[in-house]
Amino acid sequence: MTGMRRKIVLRVVSKLLIPFILLFGLYVQWHGDFGPGGGFQAGVIFAAGFVLYGLIFGLGTLREALPSWLTRVVLVLGVLLYAGVGVVTMLMGGNFLGYNVLGATPQGGQHIGIVLIEFGVGMTVFAAVMTIFCAFAGRAAADVNPVDDIGGDNG
Amino acid sequence: MVDLSFPGLLNYWFVFLLMLIGLYIVIAHENLIKKIVGLNVFQVSVFVFYISVAKVKGGTAPILADGIEVYSNPLPHVLILTAIVVGLAMTALGLALVVRVQESFGIIEDDELRALEDQQEDEGNNA
Amino acid sequence: MNLEILSSDLLNVAMLAFMGVTGVAIARIRNLFAVVMLSGIYSLLGATLYVILDAVDVAFTEAAVGAGASTVLMIGTLALTSDREKAMPNSNAWKGLIVCALVGAALVYGSLDMPLFGDPMAPAQQHVAPRYLNDSMAEIGLPNAVTSVLASYRGYDTMGEVFVIFTAACGVICLIGRTRRRPAKKSGGDK
């Protein structure tokens, strides 16, 4: 993983690509109601941008941009957002996850509910993929260089 | 009406073949990573089976638009969409277990692990 | 129109054949790095097949997850273990082949009274699917029926799936989440 840091082509091309990958992830997240896409795909694509960054620039640099407490908080928040929408619909007098009561019209309510829970799904999937990747990469870094803190040099 | 004679059941039989390749890898191979790859092969074949059940001949993707009459069935698509991501999570959990096995015993071949376990049991009985 | 249907059916069978060839290669090759790469190709072929079978959302997910994320994880595991598989004993091959023959015969026997591929009158197309396709525009108001079913009609299902992913991530943290500070001991270490 450390060897890739010296490859100039990879560094430049990945720096150019990563913003577009993240933008595409957001597009898939918010456009999933109208075309192919949704929270599951968006979460993985968004995570792929960060995974690419981690592969090229090392886990330490990735951890500076995305600390482990942050991914864990996002992991929990996504699940809570999903279940929370269900609880809110119950408090507003509807069924669990019955979105009709969320908006002025049933269709408007459905739209709000779907956008919210898709966002929850996207957050959880993104954080889960990042958590899993960092766990594996952290083990590998510890194996290669057990004395150093997980590959956290400045390249 | 559209002609259903081709591929007919043949399509399902091809999928069964993929399924059996995955099953064979899981049963016959001893390497734990290979077993997980085999499970993935098996898993994708089950996905393909679901998606081919959902297909309607002459239909299009279930994104509603004017002027289109026949759509494929969206329900299996939903089931498989979520199953793919859950499959990734389960693969990751399996691979994490493999990493732990490697760290504890230094091998990831199932038969050698079993032999090691028997040996340790024997030592325990003798002591 | 008929030519269109025929060509998509031919493509369908061709993709399945490609997947079969890749699967056999995965079973035979002992270099695990090649095996992992081939499993990525297998997933990508699967994604192409889903597009042919009208499941665009599924194809999207499979291409991102199967060919992307799980390949990265498997290569990460190879870096921590070894990329050579030891030869398996011959008896295993026979055991596997016998089990597969039995299971395959049972599957083919079970498939004989299934509706033909693509039958619009098949039971799978009758029950709730017409409701989703005809009424979801009025009830939910979204063009993508897959999203409507995923998030609204079957929202409770999807919540369960999200909990499964959450639990799996927690499991991975428990198993290998903590970085070891001491040098790795290869055998008998973590006991």
Image (spheres, coloured by chain):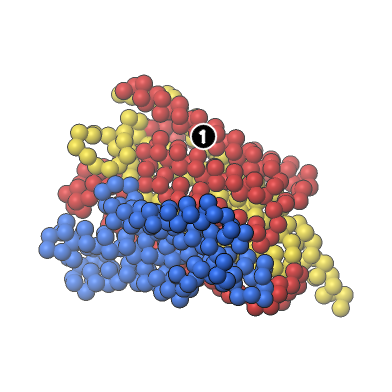
Chain colours: A blue, B yellow, C red
Please give the name of the residue rendered at 76% of the width and 51% of the height, measured from the top-left corner: C86
Q: Position of residue C28 (x, y in %)?
A: 69, 41
Taking depth in this image into account, of C186 and C52 the one nearest to the observer is C186
Query: Can residue B9 be seen?
Result: no
Q: Quadrant of residue A127?
A: bottom left
Q: With B51 as the anchor, is C21 left or right in this view?
A: right
Q: Say if C49 sits above or below A155 in the image.
A: above
Q: In the image as oriented, which residue stretches furthest toward the right?
A: B126
Dot 1 surroundings within 10 Å: few (below 14), some, or many (20 or more)? Answer: many
Please give the name of the residue rendered at 62% of the width and 59% of the height, measured from the top-left corner: A3
Quarter of the image containing the N terminus of chain B?
A: top left
Taking depth in this image into account, of B123 and B38 the one nearest to the observer is B38
Q: Say if B43 sits above or below C21 in the image.
A: below
**Image mark 1: chain:** C
Please give the name of the residue rendered at 37% of the width and 47% of the height, measured from the top-left corner: C57
Secondary structure, mark 1, is helix
Taking depth in this image into account, of B94 and A75 the one nearest to the observer is A75
The residue to which callout 1 is attached is: C16
Query: Can residue A28 be seen?
Result: yes
Taking depth in this image into account, of B14 and C190 the one nearest to the observer is C190
Q: Position of residue B63 (x, y in %)?
A: 28, 43
Q: In the image as oriented, which residue stretches furthest toward the top?
A: C3
Amino acid identity at mark 1: Leu
Q: With A89 as the anchor, is A42 left or right in this view?
A: right
Q: Say if A134 sits above or below B8 in the image.
A: below
Q: Position of residue A26 (x, y in %)?
A: 33, 57
Q: Position of residue A35 (x, y in %)?
A: 29, 47
Q: With C170 as the anchor, is C59 left or right in this view?
A: left
Q: In the image as oriented, which residue stretches furthest toward the left?
A: A104
Q: In the image as oriented, which residue stretches furthest toward the front?
A: A8
Q: With B113 as the anchor, is C19 left or right in this view?
A: left
Please give the name of the residue rendered at 42% of the width and 62% of the height, measured from the top-left corner: A126
